[in-house]
Image (tube, rainbow, N blue to C red):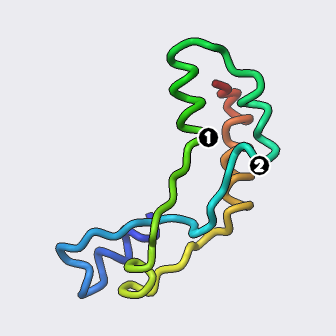
Amino acid sequence: MHLILICIDHPVAANQIFLMSDDEDLSITESDGSWIIESRDNTSKQEQYYTCLTGSLQVDITKTVEILGWMLPVEVDESVKKTAESFLARKILY
């Protein structure tokens, strides 16, 4: 939402495409979340989830930072913590 608001107001943002990322490459296989991978089923749908979780997704936000001066409003660790707390509060587990 933060970046969208900046794009609405920024005079150079019109008709541009900006990518957003926390600019920190994370790997679930190297994190505490690796239990997800170890406990996965062998169904086709589970295999798709596994590929998404373990695949690489790197986004270059250089244009967004240089043109808009955008910076991530919340640190990655704090975002992950809030997301986990929200899922746990709703008892949503996949």
Residue 55 place in picture, x, y as percent: 56, 43
Left or right of residue 50, residue 82 in this image = right
Q: Quadrant of residue 3?
A: bottom left
Where is residue 54 shown, x and y percent of the image? 62, 40
Asked which secondary structure carries label 1, the reply is: helix
Count of labels in the image: 2
Q: Which element type, helix, strand or loop, lies under badge 2?
A: helix
Classify mark 2: residues with Cα within 10 Å, few (<14), some (14-19) or many (20+).
few
What amino acid is at disc 2?
A: Glu
Q: Judge whether 43 appears above or below 88 on screen.
A: above
For residue 69, the mark is: none
Q: Residue shown at 38%/77% (left/top)?
A: 6
- Furthest-left residue in view? 15
Quadrant, the N terminus:
bottom left
Alpha carbon of mark 2 to alpha carbon of mark 1: how far? Answer: 10 Å
Towards the viewer: 88 or 16:
16
Please identify the quarter of the rendering in which residue 91 is found.
Answer: top right
Of the numbered discs 2 and 1, the one sitting upstream in the chain is 2
- The C terminus sits in image quarter: top right
The residue pinned by badge 1 equals 54
**Left or right for 91, reference 48:** right
- Kind of residue indicated by mark 1: Thr
How many residues crowd mark 1 within 10 Å: few (<14), some (14–19), many (20+)?
some
Residue indicated by mark 2: 30
As displayed, is residue 47 above or below residue 82? above
Q: Estimate the x, y position of residue 11 in percent, counting from the top left.
A: 24, 87
Residue at 45% across, 82% down: 65
